Image (spheres, rainbow, N blue to C red):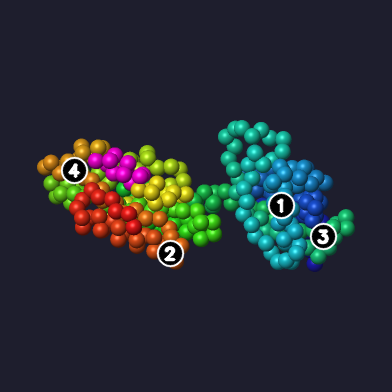
C-alpha cells in the first residue's frame, strides 16, 4: 500500500495535468502538468469555475462533457481546441497558436461539496494533430497541380450529397477534360503538357469561390463541385471558364492547334442514390460533348 504522501507526489509528477471538476464546472483539485514544454502551473484554478476561466460558449461545452461523463459512467474521450480567444482576460489579437487537447473524462464515485465529480486529464496533442493534418493534406493533394485529388473530391461530394438529401441544397458538378493535349505532348514533349495542366489549375483556382472544390480527377480530366449552385448557374460558369481557357491557353498552341476543354454539367437530383450517380451523369455528358466535337458543353 502506497502511503498517501507518496501518492500525492506521484500524482504531482504526472506529465499531463489532471483536474477534479464538479458537475457545475468547479475546479476542486489539480494534479500533474509537470511537462513544462506544454503546460503552465494550473494550481491557481482551484476554487474557480470553468466559466471564470474561459468564455461562455467554451465553458458551456466543458460543462456538457462533464455531464455526459457523469451520466454515462463511461470513459469519455474528446478532442478540443483552446486559444487566446477562448480564455478570459487575454487579448483576442496576436499570433498565439491554437492548442489542441485530448481530454479523458471519467466519473468518480464520490462527492465534493455535495456535487458529483469527474477526473479530467488533458493532453496537449498539438504536434500530433498538426502532423495528422499535414499527412491528410498530402494524401488529398495532386502533386503536379496542388489541386485536390480524387480522394478529397469524393470526401467533399459525400458531404455535399448529405446536405442535399437533408436540406435540398443543390450542388452542381462540372467535369471536363482537355482537348488536343496529346498533340501538344507529341510535338512539344510531356513537360509542355504538364505546363498546360498547371495553367488550367491556376485558372480554376482564380475563378472559383472558396466554397467550391476543383480536383484533378486523373490525367487531363478535372471535376469542379459547386455547392449551392443550380444547373443553369453551373452551365453559365462553365461557359465563362471555357471562354477563359480559349483565351489563356492559346499560348500553348502546337502547329496551330490550341488546347481547349470539353465539359459535362449536371446537378444533384432527387433520384440520385449517391454522389457517384452525379459523377457518372457528368461523365456521360462530357463524352457526349466530345462525340459532337471538341470544345463543347453538354448539360445532363
For the residues labelled 3 and 4, the Cα–Cα distance comes to: 73 Å
**Disc 2: which residue:** 272
Q: Is residue 107 at all visible to an observer of this figure?
A: no
Label 3 CA crowd tier, 10 Å (few <14, some 14–19, many 20+) = some
Report which residue position mark 1 lands on.
62
Q: Dividing the image into 4 quarters, which one contains the C terminus?
A: bottom left
- Judging by the rendered image, the residue that carries numbered circle 3 is 116
User: Which is more N-terminal, label 3 or label 2?
Assistant: 3
Q: Quadrant of residue 87?
A: top right
Q: Which residues are magenta?
A: 236-246
Say which residue appears at 21% left-offset and 45% top-offset.
259
> Rounded to the nearest whole Å, what is the CA distance between mark 3 and mark 1?
15 Å
Give the CA separation, mark 2 to mark 4: 37 Å
Q: Nearer the viewer, mark 4 or mark 1?
A: 4
Q: Within the magenta stretch, is there residue 293?
A: no
Query: Measured from the top left, where is residue 263 in percent x and y?
Result: 29, 51
| Spatial CA span between label 1 and label 2 | 40 Å
Instruction: Answer with mark 3 or mark 1, whichever residue precedes in sequence.
Output: 1
Q: Secondary structure at mark 4?
A: loop
Label 4 to label 1: alpha-carbon separation: 60 Å
**Does residue 64 sit above or below 210 in this rendering?**
below
Q: Which residue is mark 4?
A: 258
Nearer-the-camera pick, 158 or 18: 158
Amino acid at each position: 500500500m502506497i502511503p498517501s504522501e507518496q501518492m500525492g507526489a506521484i500524482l504531482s509528477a504526472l506529465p499531463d495535468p489532471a483536474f477534479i471538476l464538479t458537475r457545475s464546472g468547479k475546479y476542486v483539485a489539480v494534479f500533474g502538468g509537470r511537462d513544462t514544454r506544454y503546460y503552465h502551473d494550473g494550481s491557481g484554478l482551484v476554487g474557480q469555475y470553468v466559466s471564470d476561466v474561459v468564455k461562455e460558449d467554451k465553458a458551456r461545452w466543458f460543462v456538457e462533457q462533464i455531464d455526459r461523463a457523469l451520466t454515462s459512467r463511461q470513459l469519455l474521450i474528446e478532442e478540443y481546441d483552446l486559444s487566446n480567444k477562448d480564455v478570459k482576460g487575454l487579448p483576442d489579437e496576436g499570433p498565439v497558436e491554437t492548442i489542441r487537447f485530448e481530454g479523458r473524462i471519467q466519473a468518480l464515485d464520490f462527492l465534493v461539496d455535495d456535487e458529483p465529480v469527474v477526473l479530467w486529464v488533458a493532453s496537449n496533442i498539438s504536434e500530433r494533430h498538426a502532423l495528422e493534418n499535414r499527412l491528410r493534406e498530402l494524401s488529398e493533394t495532386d502533386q503536379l497541380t496542388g489541386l485536390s485529388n480524387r480522394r478529397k473530391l469524393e470526401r467533399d461530394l459525400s458531404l455535399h450529397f448529405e446536405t442535399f438529401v437533408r436540406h435540398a441544397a443543390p450542388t452542381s458538378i462540372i467535369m471536363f477534360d482537355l482537348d488536343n493535349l496529346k498533340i501538344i505532348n507529341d510535338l512539344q514533349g510531356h513537360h509542355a503538357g504538364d505546363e498546360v495542366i498547371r495553367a488550367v489549375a491556376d485558372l480554376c483556382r482564380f475563378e472559383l469561390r472558396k466554397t467550391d472544390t476543383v480536383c484533378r480527377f486523373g490525367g487531363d480530366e478535372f471535376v469542379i463541385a459547386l455547392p449551392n449552385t443550380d444547373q443553369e448557374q453551373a452551365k453559365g460558369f462553365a461557359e465563362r471558364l471555357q471562354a477563359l481557357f480559349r483565351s489563356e491557353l492559346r499560348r500553348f498552341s502546337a502547329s496551330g492547334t490550341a488546347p481547349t476543354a470539353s465539359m459535362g454539367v449536371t446537378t444533384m437530383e432527387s433520384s440520385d442514390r449517391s454522389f457517384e450517380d452525379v459523377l457518372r451523369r457528368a461523365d456521360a455528358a462530357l463524352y457526349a460533348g466530345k462525340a459532337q466535337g471538341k470544345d463543347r458543353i453538354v448539360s445532363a
